[in-house]
C-alpha cells in the first residue's frame, strides 16, 4: 500500500486538527475547507473507497454515522442542518484513497449541487 495520508493522521505521524476521536473513528478539520465548518470523518481501519465496503467492514459506516449528531452539536450546526458527502473514485472526485465522509456545516447548500 502506498503511504496513506489519513492513516498517517490516525497514527499521529501527521498533525491534524482533531475534533472527535474514539477507538473506531477519527474526525478532523479539512485542511482546505469549502464551508465555515468542514470536517472529515474516517474509519480507523484503511478502506480505500466506498467500492471496498463489504459485509465484513460495513460496521464502520454505522460507527461513523452514529457520531455525526454529536459532532454537529459540538460544532454548532446541529439545528441548522448540514451536508454529508462521500466522493468515490475518479468521477466522484476522490483525491484521498481512504474512505471518508465530508461533514459540511455553517452555510446553506444548493440542491442539486452545481
Ligand atoms: P476527497 O476529494 O473526497 O478525496 O477529499 C479529500 C479531502 O481531504 C479534501 O477536502 C482535502 O482538503 C482533505 N485533506 C487532504 N489532506 C488533508 C490533511 N492533511 N488534513 C486535513 N484534510 C486533508
Ligand atoms: Zn488509510
Image (tube, rainbow, N blue to C red):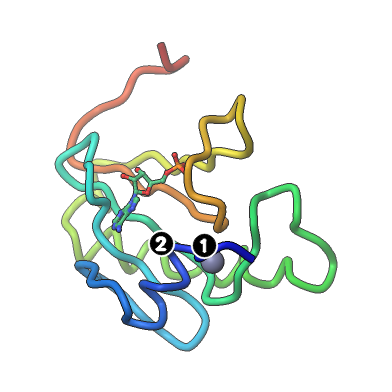
Q: Secondary structure at mark 2?
A: helix
The residue sitting at 22% across, 42% down in the picture is: 32
What percent of the width, then of the height, locates residue 33? 22, 41
Left or right? Give the position of 20 relative to 86: left
Of all residues shown, which one is farthest toward the front? 2
Q: Residues within 10 Å of mark 1 (few under 14, many from 20)?
A: few
Check if mark 1's residue and mark 2's residue have beta carbons within 8 Å: yes
Q: Which label was assigned to residue 68?
A: 2
- Label 1 residue SS: helix
Residue 4 in picture, x, y percent from top left: 50, 64
Confirm if mark 1 falls within 8 A of ligand 1.
no
Q: Is residue 105 above or below residue 20?
A: above
Spot occupied by residue 22 in the image (x, y as percentages of width and height): 41, 85
Residue 7, percent from left and from top: 47, 71
Residue ID at (64%, 66%): 1
| Residue most extreme to the top | 114
Q: CA distance from mark 1 to mark 2?
A: 5 Å
**Of 68 and 1, the residue lying toward us:** 1
Packing grade of label 2 (10 A; few <14, some 14-19, many >=20) is: some
Q: Which residue is mark 1?
A: 65
Quarter of the C terminus within the rendering: top left
Quadrant of the rendered image holding ligand 2: bottom right
Disc marking residue 16 = none
Q: Residue at 42% x, 62% y: name it.
A: 5
Quarter of the image where one finds residue 84: top left
Instruction: Say if 93 sits above or below 4 in the image.
Output: above
Residue at image location 75% in from the left, 55% down from the top: 52
Left or right of 104 in this view: 99: right
Q: Is residue 69 above or below residue 104?
A: below
Amino acid at each position: 500500500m502506498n503511504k496513506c495520508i489519513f492513516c498517517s493522521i490516525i497514527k499521529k505521524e501527521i498533525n491534524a486538527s482533531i475534533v472527535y476521536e474514539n477507538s473506531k473513528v477519527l474526525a478532523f478539520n479539512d485542511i482546505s475547507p469549502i464551508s465555515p465548518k468542514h470536517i472529515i470523518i474516517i474509519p480507523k481501519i484503511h478502506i480505500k473507497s466506498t467500492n471496498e465496503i463489504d459485509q465484513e467492514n460495513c460496521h464502520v459506516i454505522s460507527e461513523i454515522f452514529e457520531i455525526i449528531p454529536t459532532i454537529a452539536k459540538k460544532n454548532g450546526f446541529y439545528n441548522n442542518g448540514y451536508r454529508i458527502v462521500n466522493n468515490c473514485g475518479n468521477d466522484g472526485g476522490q483525491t484521498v484513497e481512504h474512505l471518508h465522509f465530508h461533514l459540511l456545516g455553517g452555510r446553506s447548500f444548493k440542491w442539486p449541487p452545481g
